[in-house]
Image (cartoon, rainbow, N blue to C red):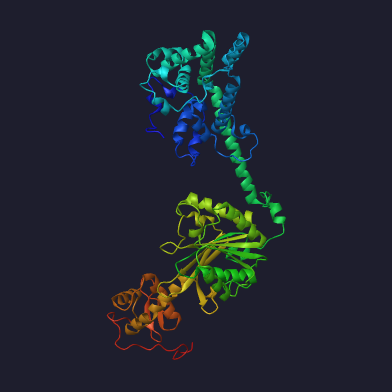
Amino acid sequence: MFDDDDDYLDSIDGLDLDRAEAAPFEWLSDHADPDHPDLEWDTIAALYRRHGVYGMSLDALEVLARPDFGDRGDLSVYLGTDHPVHEARTELRSRAAQLEAGRTERPATDGAVEDAAEKADRHAEAVRTFTFENVPGDNVLWAAIRRNRGIPIEHWSAEAVATVAAAYSALDDGERAALPAETALPAAWGEMRRRLTERFGAVGTERIMDAHTAKARRVRKRDEATEFEWRVGKLADDLTARQAAQERVRAARLGDAPPMDIARLGEVLERPGEPPYRVAGLIPSDGGTLITAQRKVGKTTFVLNLVRSLLTGERFLDQFDVQPVTGRIAFLNFEVSAAQIGRWAAEAGIDHDRLVFVNLRGRRNPLVVPEDRAALAERLRAEEVESVIVDPFGRAFTGQSQNDAGEVTAFLLDLDEFVRAEVGARDLFLTNHAGWNGDRSRGSTALEDWGDSLILLKADAKSGERYLSALGRDVEVEETVLHFDGETRHLSLNLAEGSRRKNEERRRTGELVDPIVEIVAAQPGINTSGIKATLRARSDVSFQDQYLSRAVEAAESLGLIRRESGGPGKSTRHYPAGLSGVPAAGEGASETPTETPAEGVGKTPG
């Protein structure tokens, strides 16, 4: 509709539009009307900002008055009387009433002489109620007024003259004096005076223009304190409404969750005791457990074994006693297809009625969609869910960066609130993938700060064996071998087999026993340094010094070698079993070793 929207308002000579009163108008730019593509919304917003609804054409007013707010009763209460939409609707009604009044009050044209008193009364009423907006079809858009440039102002339409004169009326005397007489504003003001004088006479015109000037200046010079208080009040109302909405949503989420628990130590100890562990020595009751696993080490199989034990009460991994759940377990499955995890659960022997799957692979995350979150919490509460498993953290996470401690902490707090307050469950199990070195959880350290128990599943790259370790509040399990039955998908663990570290020590120590026995047999009486040097020289043996002494002790305990201390300052000598007292080669040793008599044989009785 307009050729150059950005500068058309400022193109009228002498018109400083930045001085015009600025009413609230930010709302306008967010409510463009697609049904009126011929009317540019930015233009309407700019015009409203500078002149309010009085500076708009009928078309622009109709667009501004269009937004549908439904059945709101008194629109002025809902929007406020200074809201652009309300003002536009009021102005439309006003113009319609003025047009109607003009048709009913227009004097008859039958040639009859009008009564002078009635005419005077009518003119007096017209003077009293007249404003520059009273001109039918007045206040055209500025772009239309620009087309009058170059045309003598006496030939301008009444609406164009009234619009430009209205901008002039708000200027103070100094500003008016600074404008050249030939510019549009004073010219329109003078033309308006001339036309009014023809209708109402000199006295009536002065009253009209003085009243209009006073009103325009009052609006322009509105008390800043009043404006500030209005803005503060509006912002305060917005903040209050937002806070009330947040509290209502939070209350709906919390449901029937109990308030804080404040008690003295003695009072806490007097309460009926609850089992300290959900899984004895591994998982505390009412806790948050982080299960971290290396890639493809069997994380889901481990979790399904845990589910079966929690539901049946059987010992977990054939090792740990379990306090079984009385309700159901919910499994928020973000990673595996529904069909696959269902088959695995069936093979693991899990009760079909007591495990509730929430399958989310390729679906939207209910933790970030309020409607889904509320529906999920309601369903799980109805299912009487006692424990919740979230698998895995990386896909359930709702933040931007898994390495950001603040974002991860906020997510974990929100997840705790969802599980315990909204669902009403007691236990939360969160799985995660291990980092590149396999020794800790991927992502922020806030994950490990959160967990009451940290369970780590690892695999040995050489042996292929799987290991479990755990650390937490009253939890400490060294790395121990996990055994897997492929037919039943059953995992077991035997703490008596020792930890991974001890098994590694035994393996490396055992690898040195035979080479040491061979060296001692070849060099009876050899000392420890000699054994070490000989081992280093062999290409088929690699070892660390810490395992040498343990291997020597192991060989002696197995009866394969015997050691004799040389006394203070002398080396310990090593001999094959049954030999003693023979120096090593190069130390004056006899060519033929002397057999050591068996205990009690060949000795003279004392």
- Asked whether residue 425 appears in the rendered view, the answer is no
Foreground residue, 392 or 128? 128
Q: Is residue 514 above or below residue 390?
A: below
> Can you name the residue that lies furthest to the bottom here?
602
Q: Number of numbered discs present?
A: 0
Q: Position of residue 585 (x, y in %)?
A: 29, 81
Foreground residue, 275 or 152? 152
Q: Position of residue 374 (x, y in %)?
A: 61, 54
Q: Is residue 31 above or below residue 183?
A: below
Q: Residue at x 39, y 28 (%)?
A: 8
Q: Is residue 123 above or below residue 67?
A: above
Q: Residue at x 41, y 63 (%)?
A: 437
Q: Position of residue 178 (x, y in %)?
A: 39, 13
Q: Position of residue 494 (x, y in %)?
A: 54, 75
Horizontal arrangement in the rendering, residue 328 relative to residue 365 (left or right):
right
Foreground residue, 261 or 297? 297
The image quadrant that residue 207 belongs to is top right
- Asked whether residue 396 appears in the rendered view, the answer is yes
Quarter containing the N terminus: top left
